[in-house]
């Protein structure tokens, strides 16, 4: 008899877990609370146009996953060269920042201070053997020195996350913060000259690469993956909110937010209280239909001093827009549930900043829509590691259950990494289940 596996959540991770489970011969039932698949990577149709919840494009780094996705997306897949910008001072620069851009973008006196700070930080870490502190502020100062930290990271991080870097964990710097690749070049040089100690590479900034998209935006990927799963016999259920589940019954892969899983399995009160401390940063997208052929040159641009932190123009990646002489903008901003940004009251400030950037004017905007995510980014506040450990240690008591993906493992994967996490969870459960079965079969009755 085929083994049965229950998957909670139909985002990239849950869908790929289902794909792998089918390959391993399991019977799959997947529950997705929304009325469509894709989670954060799902598309949203408003009128005749599709809008992403933050521009989402597939990377081809994981070859096996890329092949599966490309086969599912078939003719709908469009290849797009990455072209991204960052507003730095009064100019737009290539993103991630290159060495010459940093040299040109920082006033000479500040630049001298930053370089001195960087050198001091490097020598201190080499000669004092000082480790990064446990908060993001100390980790950033250790990496880049105080002046560069103050100039580049402090205010921006505070505004973006609503939390000062000293209250964020150092782990946040290692796992989430884009590295200043230009500074890394300088540091690599110091390393080569044996002036500083070599360290493990952490998350690299984006390099030149080809991305994968479609005429209807990100929705093609989850839609076509789900269709291929259904064709192969998976039972995928939309509008299926999981509120209660017995973790001792059957094989379960959960990709829903960890605190919700803890509630759904009726964990003891102290575990629920700890899980509730694992918080997520919400995000709202102002999705605009704009009466202009084109607003920007890049696929997306990052902003440091505006109410939004990124604006994408998916038409530049091949999105079909109706009417054809219009374009759409995906204006992303982090927020709190219920605040002015979340409710849409911040539209005048959004338009003011779009106008100030020369992207479009109020009279260009034909339609605006709000897209919300309550769980856009896990928050790595100080001490989150201990809370996460308490919760995962508790869950380890249920060998038939895996919690994974962005929300389930409380981490920051791209789509392909979330899919890989789903595949691993399916392998762990199904292959382990197989070996348990054969051990039982061999044992005397
Ligand atoms: C603004 C932004 C831009 C991004 N851009 C990119 C990009 O360009 N490229 C890239 O590769 N990655 C990108 N990512 C990352 C990518 O979106 C995520 O890593 C990926 O979607 C994670 O997939 P997941 O399945 O783990 O989680 P999710 O996508 O969050 O899926 C979880 C699913 O569980 C469902 N669910 C929750 N609770 C329940 C419940 N109780 N019962 C049933 N179902 C439930 C949710 O509805 C959801 O569908 C971006 C992320 C953000 C926030």
Image: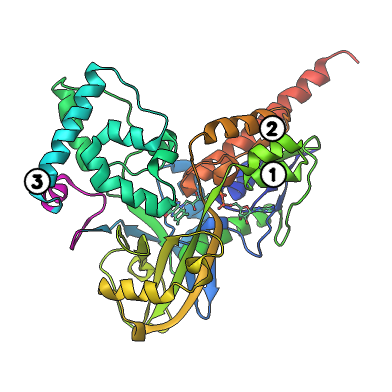
Confirm whether residue 440 shows in the render.
yes
Q: Secondary structure at mark 2?
A: helix
Cα–Cα gap, marks 3 and 2: 53 Å
Q: Secondary structure at mark 1?
A: helix
Answer with left or right where residue 146 lies relative to residue 50: left
Answer with left or right where residue 399 lies relative to residue 442: left
Q: Is mark 3 within 8 Å of ligand 1?
A: no
Residue bearing the label numbered 1: 261
* Membership of 99 in magenta stretch: yes
What residue sits 48% from the left and 59% below the top? Answer: 335
Q: Earlier in the sequence, mark 1 or mark 3?
A: 3
- Measuring from the top left, give residue 209's x and y in whole percent: 31, 50
Q: Tag 2: Cα neighbours inside 10 Å, few (<14), some, or many (≥20)? A: many
**Tag shown at residue 109:** 3
Cα–Cα gap, marks 1 and 3: 52 Å
Q: Which residues lie in the magenta part?
A: 89-104
Q: Out of 163 and 66, give the one closest to the viewer.
A: 163
Q: Is residue 150 above or below residue 394?
A: below
**Tag shown at residue 395:** 2
Look at the numbered discs 1 and 2 and tell me whether their residues touch, using CB distance below 8 Å.
yes
Q: Is residue 219 above or below residue 112?
A: below
* Quadrant assignment for the N terminus: top right
Confirm whether residue 197 shows in the render.
no
Q: Earlier in the sequence, mark 3 or mark 2?
A: 3
**Residue 230, quarter of picture:** bottom right
């Amino acid at each position: 008899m085929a083994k049965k596996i229950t998957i909670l959540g139909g985002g990239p991770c849950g869908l790929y877990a289902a794909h792998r489970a089918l390959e391993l011969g399991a019977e799959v039932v997947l529950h997705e609370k929304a009325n469509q698949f894709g989670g954060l990577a799902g598309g949203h149709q408003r009128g005749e146009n599709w809008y992403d919840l933050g521009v989402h494009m597939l990377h081809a780094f994981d070859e096996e996953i890329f092949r599966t996705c490309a086969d599912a997306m078939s003719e709908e897949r469009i290849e797009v060269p990455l072209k991204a910008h960052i507003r730095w001072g009064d100019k737009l620069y290539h993103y991630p920042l290159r060495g010459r851009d940093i040299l040109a973008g920082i006033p000479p006196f500040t630049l001298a201070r930053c370089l001195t700070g960087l050198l001091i930080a490097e020598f201190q870490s080499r000669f004092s053997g000082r480790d990064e502190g446990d908060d993001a502020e100390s980790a950033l100062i250790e990496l880049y020195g105080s002046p560069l930290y103050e100039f580049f990271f402090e205010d921006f991080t505070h505004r973006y996350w609503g939390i000062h870097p000293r209250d964020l964990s150092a782990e946040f710097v290692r796992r989430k913060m884009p590295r200043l690749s230009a500074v890394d070049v300088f540091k690599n040089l110091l390393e080569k000259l044996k002036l500083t100690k070599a360290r493990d590479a952490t998350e690299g900034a984006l390099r030149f690469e080809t991305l994968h998209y479609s005429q209807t935006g990100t929705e093609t990927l989850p839609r076509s993956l789900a269709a291929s799963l259904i064709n192969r016999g998976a039972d995928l259920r939309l509008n299926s909110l999981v509120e209660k589940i017995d973790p001792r019954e059957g094989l379960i892969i959960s990709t829903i937010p960890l605190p919700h899983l803890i509630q759904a399995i009726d964990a003891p009160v102290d575990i629920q209280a700890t899980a509730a401390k694992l918080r997520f940063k919400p995000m709202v997208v102002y999705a605009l239909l704009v009466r202009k052929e084109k607003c920007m040159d890049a696929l997306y641009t990052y902003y440091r001093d505006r109410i939004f932190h990124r604006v994408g123009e998916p038409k530049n990646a091949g999105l079909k827009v109706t009417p054809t002489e219009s374009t759409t903008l995906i204006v992303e901003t982090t927020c709190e549930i219920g605040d002015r940004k979340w409710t849409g009251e911040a539209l005048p400030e959004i338009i003011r900043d779009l106008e100030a950037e020369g992207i479009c004017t109020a009279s260009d905007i034909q339609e605006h829509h709000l897209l919300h995510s309550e769980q856009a980014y896990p928050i790595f506040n100080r001490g989150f590691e201990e809370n996460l450990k308490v919760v995962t240690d508790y869950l380890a008591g249920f060998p038939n259950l895996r919690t994974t993906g962005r929300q389930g493992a409380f981490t920051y994967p791209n789509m392909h990494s979330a899919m890989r996490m789903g595949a691993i969870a399916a392998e762990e459960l199904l292959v382990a289940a197989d070996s348990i079965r054969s051990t039982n079969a061999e044992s005397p009755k």
